[in-house]
Image (spheres, helix red, strand yellow):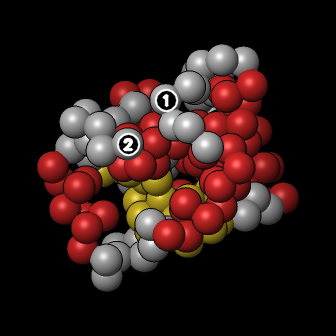
């Protein structure tokens, strides 16, 4: 199994948030499971920080890439094929960040770590929580 963290999962991991499931905590603590963080999460974090919806992680903006690597996560860039699938997925889910994560999970054969009910309903996407 190889994992892709949803942005909220990444943030909850970084802040030791109790909403993170014990199953996910165990998987991330394992250290042997390749775990990816998408460039779309950086975009989402920056956007939410800019508009004032993300204030609970001081210094994250200046150290984002460093923090991701320090946690043992692998960066996943956005490619054109990801963008084409994300834009073309038939779904009522309108969040562009989530659509990109879903597309990347499908194309890269990754299990998306999320508790987002809308993402869990996409039949193409394998999720875990």
Residue farthest to the bottom, as pictured? 32
Question: Residue at horizontal 61%, vertical 43%?
Answer: 59
Q: Quadrant of residue 69?
A: bottom right
Q: Left or right? Give the position of 109 relative to 32.
A: right
Which badge, 2 or 1, comes first in the chain's sequence?
2
Question: Residue at horizontal 24%, vertical 73%?
Answer: 30
Up the image or down, 79 lies above or below 102; here it is below
Task: Classify 10 Å Cα crowding around label 1: few (below 14), some (14-19), many (20 and above).
Answer: few
Q: Left or right? Give the position of 20 relative to 37.
A: left
Mark 1 lies on a secondary structure that is: loop
Q: Residue 40: x percent and y percent? A: 68, 47
Of 20 and 60, the residue lying toward us: 60
Up the image or down, 76 lies above or below 41; here it is below
Of 107 and 79, the residue lying toward us: 79
Q: Residue 118: x percent and y percent? A: 44, 28
Verify CB contact (< 8 Å) between mark 2 and mark 1: yes
Disc 1 designates what residue?
56
Q: Residue 23: x percent and y percent? A: 17, 54
Callout count: 2
Task: Classify 10 Å Cα crowding around label 2: few (below 14), some (14-19), many (20 and above).
Answer: few
Mark 2 lies on a secondary structure that is: loop
Residue farthest to the front, as pictured? 58
Up the image or down, 57 lies above or below 69; here it is above
Disc 2 designates what residue?
15
Q: Quadrant of residue 44?
A: top right
Q: Quadrant of the image for the N terminus?
A: bottom left
- Between the C-alphas of marks 2 and 1, the distance is 8 Å
């Amino acid at each position: 199994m190889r994992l892709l963290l949803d942005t909220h999962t990444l943030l909850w991991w970084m802040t030791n948030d109790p909403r993170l499931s014990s199953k996910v905590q165990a998987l991330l603590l394992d250290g042997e499971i390749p775990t990816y963080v998408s460039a779309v999460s950086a975009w989402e974090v920056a956007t939410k920080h800019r508009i004032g919806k993300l204030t609970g992680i001081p210094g994250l903006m200046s150290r984002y890439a460093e923090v991701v690597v320090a946690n043992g996560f692998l960066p996943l860039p956005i490619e054109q094929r990801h963008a084409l699938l994300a834009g073309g997925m038939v779904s009522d889910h309108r969040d562009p960040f989530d659509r990109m994560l879903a597309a990347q999970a499908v194309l890269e054969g990754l299990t998306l770590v999320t508790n987002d009910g809308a993402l869990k309903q996409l039949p193409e996407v394998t999720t875990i929580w």
